Image: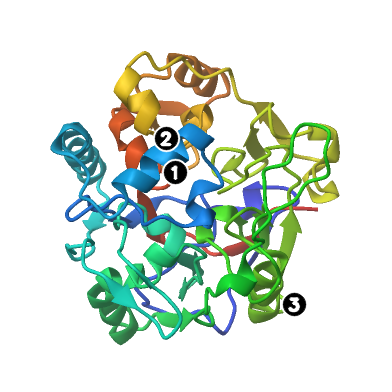
Amino acid sequence: MGVAQRPGITAEVTGSETLGSPVNSHNEWDPLEEVIVGRLDGATIPSSHPVVACNIPPWAARLQGLAAGFEYPRRLIEPAQQELDQFVTLLESLGVTVTRPDAVDYKQRFATPDWSSRGFCNSCPRDGMLVIGDEIIETPMAWPCRYYETHSYRALLKDYFHRGARWTAAPKPQLTEELYDKDFRPPKDGEPMRYILTEFEPVFDAADFMRAGRDLFVTRSNVTNQTGIDWLRRHLGPGYRIHEIESRCRTPMHIDTTFVLLAPGKVLVNPEYIDVDRLPDVLRSWDVLVAPEPDPIDERLLKMTSMCGKWLSMNVLMIDEKRVIAERHHTGMLRALESWGFEPIPCDLLHYAPFGGAFHCATLDVRRRGTLETYCD
C-alpha cells in the first residue's frame, strides 16, 4: 500500500515481523492472498449449555436442547455445502490461496476433569483463531462444545509455524460453573446491560474483534468477557490499542454483524446496535456508513434454524480496499456498497447461517499483502 499517498497514515515494519512468514495480516482490507475456509463435515448440533442457549429465543433453545449432539440433517447441510463449494471456487478464481481444516466427527464425546460434551463443527475459523501480523493466537472460547475445535487446524498451524509464523495459545479455560451466571436472563430494553459470563477467567472469541493495524476494536459479549479483553491487551503490549465498542444488542455475540471495518477510514455500522455518537474518539475522522435494512428471508426452515440474526447481511469479506464479497440475496447491501465506492462481488452463502455465519465468519485471512500501519488519530 502506498503510504505516502495517504495523509495521516504511518507505516511501520517492526523487528518482530518475520520476513517470509506465511502468516501476515494486519487489517480487514489489505489485498487477500491466503485464507482458511471452514468445513461442514461432521457438523453436530451444539450440546446443551446455558452459554449456547442464552443468545436464542426460548422456543429455539428448547428445540436446540432436544436435538443437541445429533448430526445436522442433510436438508440443512446439502444447500450450505453447495454454496460453500461455490464460495471456495470464487476465492480461487480471484487468485486467493484457500486452505481447509481437517474433517472431524463432532458427535464424539470428550471430557475434561470437570465436564464432558460433544462438539460442534469447524465451519467458522474466524472464532477460534486471531491473526495479528505474523502471529496466530488460539482463543479461549466460552462454549464447551468448541473446547478442542482448533485441533482440526493443527496441521495448518504446525505448517505455518515451521515456515516462520508465530503461534500462541491463550490460557486454556476451565469452563466450570464459576464462569457462568446461573441466574442470567437477557436484559430487556432499558435495563442495564448484563452478560452470562463472569470474570472468573479470560475467555474470548476472535470474531468479537476487528483489526485496523495498530488499533483493534472489540465488543464485550456473551462469549467475550472483560478479563479476556484485558488478557489480549496485555499480550499485545503497548504497540497496540484495543478500543471497546458499545453495542445496544441485548444478546451480543461477535462484532461482525455490528461494526465492520471495510477500508482505511471507512466503517460499516449496524443502526440497531450502534449509536454513532458514542463511537470511540479515534474514529472521528472516519466515514461511518450505516447499513441498510436487511432484505427479509422468506425461507421458513432457514429462519427457524439460523444461529445468526437478520444483520448477517453485514458479514462481508474484503478482497482488497475496493472489492468485497457480499450475499447475493441482500440486494440492498449490494447497492449500498456500490454507492459507497466499493465493487461488490455477489455470492451465495445464505444457507450457512445454521452453522454460525457468512463470509467473514467462514474464513480466516492468513495472509494479506501489507504492513503494520496506523489508521486512527
* Mark 1 in CB contact with mark 2 (< 8 angstroms): yes
- Mark 2: few/some/many CA within 10 Å (<14, 14-19, 20+): some
Label 3, label 1: how many angstroms apart (C-alpha)?
28 Å
Where disc 1 sits, the SS reads loop
Mark number displayed over residue 154: none
The answer to whether 288 is drawn above or below residue 66 in the figure is: above
Residue 120: % across, % down? 32, 57
Q: Which residue is mark 3?
A: 238
Upstream in the sequence, badge 2 or badge 3? 3
Q: Amino acid at mark 3?
A: Pro
Image coordinates of residue 366 in percent, x first then y, are 38, 63
Label 1: few (<14), some (14–19) or many (≥20) C-alpha neighbours in 10 Å: some
State how far apart marks 2 and 3 are (Cα): 32 Å
Q: Mark 3, mark 1: which one is toward the viewer?
A: 3
Is 333 on the left-hand or right-hand side of 235? left
Q: Which circle's residue, 3 or 1, is located before the other in the chain? A: 3
Residue 311 drawn at (x, y percent): 53, 29
Q: Which residue is identified by label 1?
A: 320
Whole-number angstrom distance, CA of label 1 to CA of label 2? 5 Å
- The nearer-to-camera label among 2 and 3 is 3
Q: Residue at x 17, y 53 (%)?
A: 41
In the rendered view, does 348 fall on the left or right side of 51?
A: left
Residue 141 higher or lower than 348, as above or below: below
Residue sitting nearer the eye, 75 or 281: 75
Residue that carries the numbered disc 2 in the rendered image: 323
